[in-house]
Image: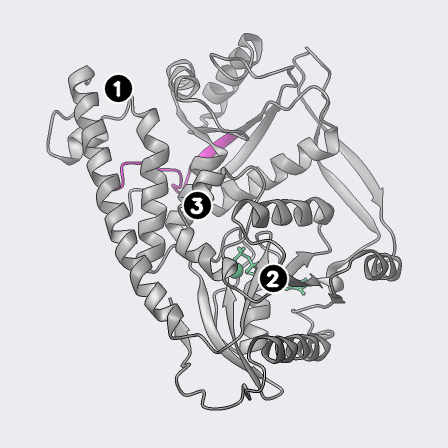
Amino acid sequence: MLAKGNKTPTYETAHEAEKAVLVAVPDKREDDARITESLDELAFLTETAGTVPIKRFVQKLEKPDIRTFVGSGKLEEIRAYVQHAGATTVIFDDDLSPSQLRNLEKELKVKILDRTLLILDIFALRAKTATARTQVELAQYQYLLPRLTGLWTHLERQRGGVGMRGPGEREIETDRRVVRDRISLLKEQLKDFDKQSQTQRKSRTGIVRVALVGYTNVGKSTLMNLLSRADVFAENKLFATVDSTVRKVVLENVPFLLSDTVGFIRKLPTRLIESFKSTLDEIREADLLLHVVDISHPMFEEHIQVVNDTLKDIGAVDKRTILVFNKIDQYSTDVDIAQHLHEVEPDHDEDLVMREEHQHRPSLEQLKSSYMARMHDPVIFVSAQERVNIDELRDMVARHVRTLYEQQYPGQAPFADLSAYTAETE
Ligand SMILES: Nc1nc2c(ncn2[C@@H]2O[C@H](COP(=O)(O)OP(=O)(O)OP(=O)(O)O)[C@@H](O)[C@H]2O)c(=O)[nH]1
Ligand SMILES: [Mg+2]
C-alpha cells in the first residue's frame, strides 16, 4: 500500500485482513508503564496504517540481540505464534538495522516493519501536496537504501525485469543504482519546491507568523479550524496532518498567518524529520508558537519533552511560545490503564497478562496552578471540542501578536492593506 505512487518500492502495510504482532525490546531498567505506553502508541500507529494489532511480545534485555533483535527463545515463541495466528506482519517498536531486518525476515517468513517504516507508511497515506509527497518519498528511499538486499525483488519486477527469480548481487547493485538516481531526482525536485516556497515566504514579510506545534493527535488541526474557521482535516488518528497548511487569520483586528504542522512523536529519527524541511521551515520561521498539549493523555508531560527536544533538533529554539493545554473536557484524575501490561522480568521470557492499573492524577485545578506558577511561558487550558476558553485563547493570541507587531514593525499599523496576504495552502 505504500506503493501508492507506483514508483515507491516499499512494503505493503495495510490490507484489509492484515494482522500484526507487535514486539518491544526495552532496556532492562525501563519501567512497565512506559513500555506499555510506547506499545499502545505503536498499536495506534498500526491501526492508523490500516493493520490490526493482535498480540504483543516484550522482552527486556540489556541490549537488543545484534542478529535478530530479540533473543532466540523469544524468536521461537514469536514464530510459533505468527504461524498459529496467521499473522502477516511483525512490527518492532524500535529501529532495526539492515541485517536484523534481513535475518528476521528469513526467520519469521512474514513482513517485518519497524517504527520508522510504519510512520513513513502513514505519512505516505496522508501526504497530499506535491511537496509533502516528494518529502515522504525521499525519506522512504533514504531509509530503504541501506536495507536494500536480495529481498527487494519488486524493483526488478516493476521495471519488467527478472520477475520472481532470486536476485543476485548484480540485481541488488542495479536496485541500489535505481534508488540512488531516484534520490537525486527527488532532492532536485525538493530544491525547486523550496525555491518556490522561499519566494512565497518573502512575499509574507510584514506579517506576524504563528505556528501550531505539538505531539501528534493533540488537537492542532481542530484549533486551526476554530481559530481560522478553515476546514482542515482533523481526525482521531496519528498524523492526520502531514502537509503544512497556512491561513491568514484576523483576530480582534489583528492579522497574522497561522500554520498547522505535522505532529511530532517519540523515537522519530532526526534525519527523517529533516526530510520534511520545508514543512519545518514554517516552524523555524514562526514568530510565535502555540504548543498544543493533550492534557488528557497520561503521558502528556513526556510529550511536552519530546516536542521541546524535537524543536531543539530542528533549530526552532528561543521562540515566544504559548502552552495550550487542550482536551480539558476529557481530563480525568483517575486514569484506568486497563490494557495489556507486560509482566517483565529480566532475562526471562515472559508473556502478556491483563492487569488493571490505576493512576491517580492531580485535579485539573492543581495542574493549572502548578503549571501557571512553573512555566515562564504563558499557559492556557482549553477544550477545542467543547469550545471552552476559546475566546480567552483568541484574546491571548491577539495580544501576543499585537506585541510582536509593535516590536518588529514599530510605527507601522499592522492593519493596513492585507489583500496581499490571501489565504493559502501549501
Ligand atoms: N475530547 C476532546 N477531543 C478533542 C479536542 N480537540 C481535538 N479533539 C480530538 O482529537 C483528535 C485529534 O485532533 P486533530 O485536530 O486531528 O489533532 P492534530 O494535533 O492535528 O493531529 P495530527 O495532525 O495527527 O498530528 C480528533 O478526534 C479531535 O476531534 C478536545 O478539546 N477534546
Ligand atoms: Mg493535524
Q: Is residue 1 visible?
A: no
| Residue type, label 1 | Gly
Q: CA distance from mark 3 to mark 1?
A: 29 Å
Residue at image coords 42%, 74%: 204
Location of residue 159 in the rendering, given as x and y in whole percent from the top left corner: 13, 35
- Residue at the limit of the structure toward the bottom, as seen here: 416
Residue at numbered disc 3: 274
Badge 2 local density, few (<14 within 10 Å), some, or many (20+)?
many
Instruction: Kindly identify which numbered label has been placed on residue 310.
Output: none
Instruction: Count neighbours of disc 1 (C-alpha within 10 A) and say few if under 14, some if 14 to 19, many if 20 or more.
Output: some
Q: Which residue is mark 2?
A: 219
223 on left or right of 167: right
Residue at (55% x, 79% y) in the render: 409
Percent of width and height locating residue 417: 45, 90
Give the mark nearer the N terminus: 3 vs 1.
Answer: 1
Look at mark 1 in the image and give the residue it sits on: 150
Point out the tag, 2 or 1, that comes first from the N-terminus: 1
Q: Which residues are magenta?
A: 5-21
Q: Amino acid at mark 2?
A: Gly
Q: Any magenta on residue 231? A: no
